[in-house]
Image (cartoon, rainbow, N blue to C red):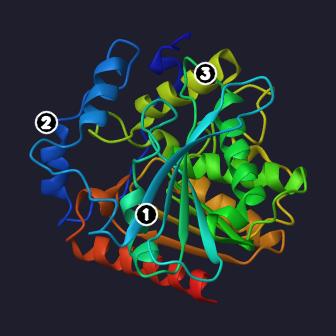
Amino acid sequence: MTETPTDQIFPDTPARPPFDPELVPVLEAARQDVSTFSAENLALIRQLSAEGLPGVEPVDLTVGGAIRVEERQVPGPEGAPDVTVLILSPAVDGPPRPAIYHAHGGGMVIGNRRLGVETFLPYVADGHAVVVSVEYRLAPEHPDPAPVEDCYAGLVWTAKNAADLGVDPERIMIAGTSAGGGLAAGTALLARDRAFPRLSHQILICPMLDDRFETHSSRMLDDEGLWDRNANLFGWTALLGDRRGGPDVSPYAAPARAEDLTGLPRTYLDTGSAETFRDETLTYARRLSEAGVSVDLHMWGGGFHGFDMMAGNAAVSRASLATRDEFFRRALEG
């Protein structure tokens, strides 16, 4: 993987909005614990990510027995290894339920099928959903198109095995955060273009959509202890190599490049006002709307990347999480 000197990519640092004051202490604490994303640090970052936060007990995915937890090996893309999926279903059998198909975050380079699934536990525990979370291959060892094709293969398996999973095949939504949001968007494009399966919704949380670094927000964060422009450059270069930023990049890898956004499912998008992915999220929402897609868009003032996960008790985080939860519940119960 070739690493381009950052001063060639970022000649200046545009202004950014201020962080929400209630988030600043959390951000300052996080800066002490975050390693810089680089080829040299990647193994350490993966290890720390897998171990979780010190002193924090792992989440009980069964929610005291209300959820049935299962893992399966399912067919991967043609000629590629099988894909592992984590399946969370209500312990009490019932009629077919909507499915939330989930792609985890991690900048395309870290994470696993369990990362972020705690978000969906209430919907499974109360009997409203089945969750299938996919473990896709990570870059740079497995560059594009491996991650998005793994995600699509798991989605196809989910749709074809809906009856066995207790899923309503007409009510499958896709969701992802950060890199997972970009992969969810790319997988939704694949599902549309390959005419299977039909998705009811896509929920894209601060999604990673654009490899070109042409927007204001993609350049405005430098060494903030967050997913800044340097980490973002590392993630995209890991995925795309020397193709990053050039003409030979698929819209399935970088959905902001898709020329046609018609025929996509109803979309929920959110972002912070002080984060790297802000502008590509806003542009994608506008373009989806212009293509006739129903879009719910939310930008949270002062929010940095992952603010509502890192500082869940802050007022802006509570508002963000409540708004997202309300959308999920309407989508699941409608």
| Residue 54 screen position, x and y as percent | 12, 41
| Amino acid found under the numbered disc labelled 1 | Arg
| Foreground pick, 315 / 167 | 167
In the picture of the structure, the residue carrying the numbered disc 1 is 68
Quick one: SS at disc 2?
loop
Task: Residue under label 3, please give it.
Answer: 142
> Is label 3 or label 1 in front?
1
Q: In the displayed structure, would residue 261 be above or below residue 297?
A: above
The N terminus appears in which quarter of the rendering?
top right
Q: Is residue 153 left or right of residue 238?
A: right
Q: Badge 3: how crowded within 10 Å, few (<14), some, or many (20+)?
A: some
Mark 2 and 1 residues: CB-CB less than 8 Å, in contact? no
Q: Are marks 3 and 1 in contact (CB under 8 Å)?
A: no
Q: Amino acid at mark 2?
A: Gln
In the image, is residue 304 above or below residue 326?
A: above
- The answer to whether residue 225 shows anywhere in this view is yes
Q: Which is nearer the N-term, disc 2 or disc 3?
A: 2
Cα separation, mark 2 vs mark 3, equals: 30 Å
Q: Earlier in the sequence, mark 3 or mark 1?
A: 1
Residue at (76% x, 30% y) in the render: 249
Report helix, strand or loop for mark 1: strand
